[in-house]
Image: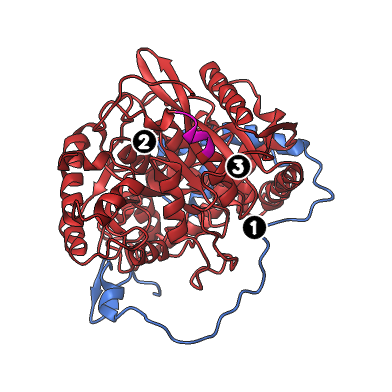
Chain colours: A red, B blue
Amino acid sequence: MSRSDLPALTIADLQSFLRRKEVSPGEVIESLRAQIETVEPKIDAYLSMDFEAALKEAERIDVDLPLGGVPIAIKDLINVKGQPCTCGSKILGNYRSPYDATVIQRLRAAGAIPLGKTNMDEFAMGSSTENSSVKVTRNPWDLSRVPGGSSGGSAAAVAADAAFGALGTDTGGSIRQPASLSGVVGVKPSYGRVSRFGLTAFASSLDQVGPLTKTVCDAAMIMKAMAGHDPQDSTSLPDPVPDYTKNLGRNLKGVRLGIPKEYRVGGIDPQVSSAVNAAIKQLESLGAEIIHLSLPHTEYGISVYYLLATAEASANLARFDGVRYGYRANHPKDLLDHYGRTRGEGFGAEVKRRVILGTYVLSSGYYDAYYVRAQKVRELIRQDFVKAFEKVDAIISPTSPEPAFKLGERTANPLAMYLADIFTNTGNLAGICGISVPCGFAKVNGSQLPIGLQILGKALDEARIFQIAYAYEQSTDWHKARSPISLNSKSEIRSAK
Amino acid sequence: MARTTDLDVGYVSKLARLNLSDEETALFQRQLADVLKYVEKLHEVDVSQVETAAHAVPMFNVFREDEPGPCFTPEEALANAPQKANQLFIVTKVVE
């Protein structure tokens, strides 16, 4: 293959080339640079790139390390030393990270090279990446549509071969939903599985860092490199990290998959329903047993999520006060004016909206009615899953109720935007793990729009969802279909074998 | 549960130390009233027997040895300061 085709490779295939010395890490970065320069004017996935730093690192990389010589794109709310970390916000416009997040330290130790920071909804608040204060990212499958969000830059970059793999964060679906809408694999690890140290906090009881990749195997490789206990994050779990690649290739005989009746709600796009139904049949043909079950508190997920996530965000974002870092309003007349104008001028509309809602639900007189009640319903949602996982090994659903929507279509109606998370955010509330894998396409006005299948597993059972996702992926050709602006876009897409 | 009309965006923005324009105040008042109306459905749920959970994974009393580790130099700590002088952050006057 020619050098210019390298960015089309999966991480696993790239490593074979690197280890056989058929290509050097520096050449990999140069080939990726060329592809980024080709597609960036169309998709605007990146906020910043530092090729010189990456090339320097490439000079002394050991390609025999688990991710040796593999460039990884990083969502711009994860700190990478010396690089900007804007969180998609004007308030951090001039910020440079003075340290590496734990996940970055671990990826570096595994030989990966952080290359470029990707666009996102401001402070990860959104489902379309349109809330970025910097620019709008476009879906590589249809440039008039959103890539999903909030990790939309990471998803679009992977879908356009402008990244071999990327990190995102998932608070209510922000990895899985853009993975689904952009036709890539995305993993939300169990709460506590991956360190949050060095990640700019949005909702601390829900946030997790996870990978977005072209294949399930690549996601398992990145997870293996970055999961595990971190003394810097008191909520990270001490449990040992299994080899997530070990179960890949095992068949699904005896695996029990749950289909919750509450996920058959109205408002699901018919093409999404039929793709997911076909995927369920496919999983059954691979030996899985399908069990119908109930998660009775599902309908309260969005309400609980938006009360708790905004409450936590209002507290977390109090740190943006213009004192030690970030934007500061000019010539404040006193301290209140300093805070009020710094934050009023620094934050975008969605962030302000959520800080107001979060402040309100935590305020005296409303705390019990909103925050405490939401915490209790959260516990009921968690118990729903605990009970379900006594009967099944994983739960199957669409990742998103619909394929990618048009740019600008939802921005005037925040509640409609929030409903994009209907299948994903209960997983965050319950602290369990989930993965989105491509499972087909919707044909909308001449465009082919990816559809994602969500597989939810019990807490710390990532190995199981990787096994199921891999078996499904390998029995279909969806992951081989590439977006029209990727390097080797295949116009013809076959359905399941 | 509280009535949604209780939300006064102008007042809450003061609590949040977050200045809003008149247009933003009016817009958020309307949009958040919709959101609060939507979440009213939580009122249907019987939570009388439920203990409050702040985290999905209960963890308590996480301790570590109190040992000094690597830390920023003053220059690194001040690198992103909006205003600085003499190895100090310059802040807006706090006391009269």
Q: Are marks 1 and 3 on the same chain?
A: no
Q: Residue lying furthest bottom in this view?
A: B67
Residue labelled with disc 1: B55
Count of numbered tags: 3
Mark 2 belongs to chain: A
Q: Nearer the viewer, mark 1 or mark 3?
A: 3
SS for callout 1: loop
Q: Are marks 2 and 1 on the same chain?
A: no
**Amino acid type of the residue tagged 1 in the rendering:** His
Is A98 or A187 nearer to us in this picture? A187
Residue B47: x %, y % from top left: 80, 46
Residue labelled with disc 2: A130
Looking at the image, is A205 positioned above or below residue A8? Answer: below
Describe residue A345's horizontal placement relative to residue A50 as left or right: right
Give the residues in magenta.
Answer: A471-476
Q: CA distance from mark 2 to mark 1?
A: 30 Å
Looking at the image, is A171 positioned above or below residue A492? Answer: below
Q: Residue at x 28, y 25 (%)?
A: A484
Is disc 1 surrounded by few (<14), some (14 to 19) or many (20+) residues within 10 Å? some
